[in-house]
Image (spheres, rainbow, N blue to C red):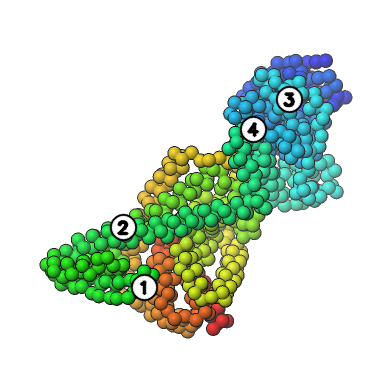
Amino acid sequence: MHSPQSSIGQKLEFKKVVLAGNPNVGKSLIFNHLSGLYAEVSNFPGTTVSITSAWYKNYNIFDTPGIYGVSSFNDEERVAKEIILQGDVILSVVNALNLERDLFLTLQLIDMGKKVSVILNMMDEVKKQNLKIDTKKLSDLLGVEVYETSALKGEGLDKIEEAIQKARIGKQDKLIHEKLKLVKDKITNQSEALLFLEGDREILKKYSDIKLPITDIREEIYIHRRNRVKEIVDAVESKDTPSGLFFSKLGRLALNPLTGIPILLLILTLVYFFVGDFVAQRLVDFTENTIGKGIVEYNLKKLVAHSINTDIEVTILDDDDNAIQNKTFSFPNGISNDTKTFQEFEQFISDKNVELNFIFHNVIAQFFFGEFGVITMTVTYLFFLLLPLVTSFYLTLAFLEDSGYLPRLAAMADRLFTKVGLNGKAIIPIILGFGCVTMATITTRMLGTEREKTIATAILQFVIPCSAQLAVITVLLSAAGPKAIVLYVAVMFIVLILTTTLLDKLVPGHSSPLILDLPLMSLPDPKNVLRKTYYRTLGFMKEATPLFFLGTAIIGLLNLTGLIIVWINFLEPLTTKWLQLPKESAVAFIMGMIRRDFGAAGLFHMNLSVYQTVVALVTITLFVPCIASFLVMIKERGIAKGLIIWAGTWFFAFTIGGLVSQILI
């Protein structure tokens, strides 16, 4: 029962079956099988704009242009939309190799309330690539029948008639139902109602009397549908191997909050022990102190001190790095002219845990090689502190990216972060901030808008303690007792809520929706992970080096001119009267500008009460970022925003710390 192509109006007495799908999914091959006609499969513009139709038994079959969504943005979509609206049955033809792309249209057809069957085409290619698609689960999730075909080989096409007969209305989404209620009194046709909410221009004109914030509604529907597609694909698609099945199941578990949160906690623990503990604490302690200061800095300074007036201050430390003895060795004419004293010096420091301070009486030597020397401090910071951190961070990030876990983490956290003006991607820099705020600031690049980057950067600089600082805070709180721990955690939680709320209200602009691809989870390719790590680390070091020279030059000038002492004296009234802390705590805050953990460690030797400990730790946690974070922040956010955030941390830290002090002490 075949007939030649004719107009739509001539076949209204037959049940209309519409083939709909993305470009190049095999619709025309299926149409040819049903109709007996030959239609050239071509994607050139205009080839399929005119609807091809034919009779098949008691059905009127229509082949529509390839579209990605039902709308009126171009002629192909407009023609396809009109036929789909009239269709009694829609056969949604899907390329099984591109489920994430193609199922968006399928879900839209189901949301329109149409009777649908899914034709899962190109299954021969799926098998060649060792993929597995659980068609039964896909059918259950969509609420419609799913049929496997390979149209090019003619496989599975004998089931098309059954697909037409068993087409049904699929599972309707709750959000769509809620939105449809907004127009149900004025638009009775569900398909038109949905297209109205999605901003179809022709439908909007038809119902121009209905006034709704269509742009916001359309965006919400599209984002929600895209996330539904991701969840479905992750649930039904996997590699047809034991490891592929394992990772497919793991991917589904990672998206479900009930199982995803424990998985997140496990991954955070592993990341913390690798980046925050092993690298940031143990490895950096070795590279910075043993190699950087103990070998490189020492020999550079020794070379500089060869023939100029130099004093070497030696502080002997116990096993807990507490100072137990101080001694100064003087070389008025340089160490080369006083070899006997230098031999005594080296014998004195041998086999001891010491801290050395070379004091050069030559201003230029002190500026470049002194305690805050531009060259020595920059070399130590860049190569022996930041390089291990940057490398480990990028290694971890590349591993999580290539495994497919990061997009799932972002999708799971999206609802929570949306409440503070961010999207789910922001969880990545926030989590990494507990390892190293400097590295976390770099990762704000992945966020979609300047508003999101600014909010995330501010949260990192204001509230999040890095692992080095967190370790010192933990020791101090443990010594102060449970009351101090409870008070500190309570204050920081309140501050976090207050900060995120204020930033969401004050920072101008709009946040971006979360739109992610959810690739199959798998073990990453080591070569690709190492390649990413190498190029990202190299790029960071190139960008950071001039900034660090500039920053250390500023610190060096402040030290040489005595402005650091002026700053300490300026802070003293704030620390003694407003914060009600010992006057020497001002030094701890200044040291915190250089390294956050230096500031916290400066509180070790002070005789503080429980409440003073809480006040000091709250203030120093909220205090200005270390010089590394500050310089990276300037680079990432620009000097204006960077300085505003930097100044804001001063005000914020002393305001909150003072209020806590006035309440508790």
Left or right, 497 with respect to 52, comes to: left
Residue 63: which disc? 3
**Residue 664 quadrant:** bottom right
Please tell me which of labels 2 and 3 falls first in the chain.
3
Rounded to the nearest whole Å, what is the CA distance between mark 1 and mark 2?
Answer: 21 Å
- Which one is closest to the eye, mark 4 or mark 3? 4
- Per the model, the C-alpha gap separating discs 2 and 3 is 71 Å
Who comes first in sequence, dot 4 or dot 2? Answer: 4
Crowdedness of circle 3 by 10 Å Cα count: few (<14), some, many (20+)? Answer: many
Determine the residue positioned at 40% across, 45% down. Answer: 534
Q: Check if mark 4's residue and mark 3's residue have beta carbons within 8 Å.
A: no
Question: What's the amino acid at mark 4?
Answer: Lys
| CA distance separating discs 4 and 2 | 52 Å
| Amino acid under disc 1 | Asn
- Foreground: disc 3 or disc 1: 1
Q: Residue at x 45, y 48 (%)?
A: 395
* Marker disc for residue 132: 4
| Residue 271 x %, y % | 50, 53
Point out the tag, 1 or 4, that comes first from the N-terminus.
Answer: 4
Where residue 210 appears, x then y in whole percent? Answer: 79, 49
At 19% from the left and 73% from the top, the residue drawn is 330
Q: Dot 1 lies on which element?
A: loop
Depth check: 591 or 116 in front?
Answer: 591
Q: Amino acid at mark 3?
A: Asp
CB within 8 Å, label 2 to label 3: no
> How far apart in space, not on screen, are marks 4 and 3 (Cα)?
29 Å
